[in-house]
Amino acid sequence: MDMFYELLMKIKKKPMMYMVKKSILHLQMLILGYDIGKSEVDNNYHSILDGFGDFANEYCGRNARAAGWAMNIYHYTNKDEEKAFDKFYELLDEFLKQKGNPEPTKSTEI
């Protein structure tokens, strides 16, 4: 896959190396920072997460787009940041499979 996917897998394996704590909200900020930085240097950049927000919001049964996918996953897991972090990766697997990439994150070794 691409470098961003590889980074996400490294974060999944050792979140404390990249963030202050294992948290869906911290992960969202890291992803946002990556996307902003990448789009600044590459006008043609498209994230593998394009469309993920709508997918996650629908899965969580929340139509609160303004809250964002991370906050919707956070509420879906009863405001448990660690469970929400883990749920992100479950949803990422499902999302990528639907997009035609069958490579699940669970079997990825970095």
Image (tube, rainbow, N blue to C red):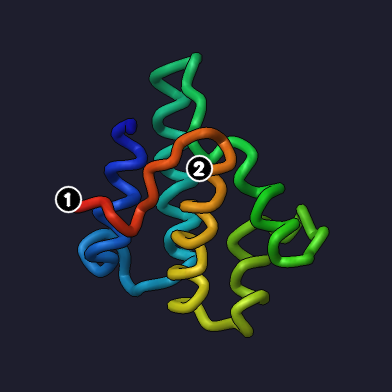
**Disc 2 + disc 1, Cβ < 8 Å:** no
Residue at 59% x, 61% y is 70
Residue that extends furthest to the right in the rendered view of this protein: 63
Q: Which residue is identified by label 2?
A: 96
Depicted 8 relative to depicted 74: above or below: above
Q: Earlier in the sequence, mark 2 or mark 1?
A: 2
Task: Give coordinates of residue 33: x percent, y percent.
Answer: 43, 44
The quadrant in which the N terminus is found is top left
Is 77 left or right of 43, judged from the image as shown? Answer: right
Task: Give coordinates of residue 100: x percent, y percent.
Answer: 52, 33
Depicted 78 relative to depicted 39: above or below: below
Q: Which residue is identified by label 1?
A: 110
Q: Nearer the viewer, residue 60 or 45?
A: 60
Depicted 102 relative to depicted 16: above or below: above
How crowded is the residue under tag 2: few (<14 C-alpha within 10 Å), some, or many (20+)?
A: some
Q: CA distance from mark 2 to mark 1?
A: 18 Å
- The three-letter amino acid code for the residue at tag 2 is Leu
Residue at 42% x, 17% y is 42
Residue at 23% x, 65% y is 14
Task: Give coordinates of residue 40: x percent, y percent.
Answer: 44, 24
* Secondary structure category for the residue under label 1: loop
**Mark drawn on residue 30:** none
- The three-letter amino acid code for the residue at tag 1 is Ile
How many discs mark residues in the rendered view? 2
Q: Nearer the viewer, residue 44 or 36?
A: 44
Is 42 left or right of 7, judged from the image as shown? Answer: right
> Image quarter for residue 34?
top left
Task: Give coordinates of residue 72: x percent, y percent.
Answer: 67, 66
Is 82 left or right of 79, judged from the image as shown? Answer: left
Residue at 28% x, 55% y is 107
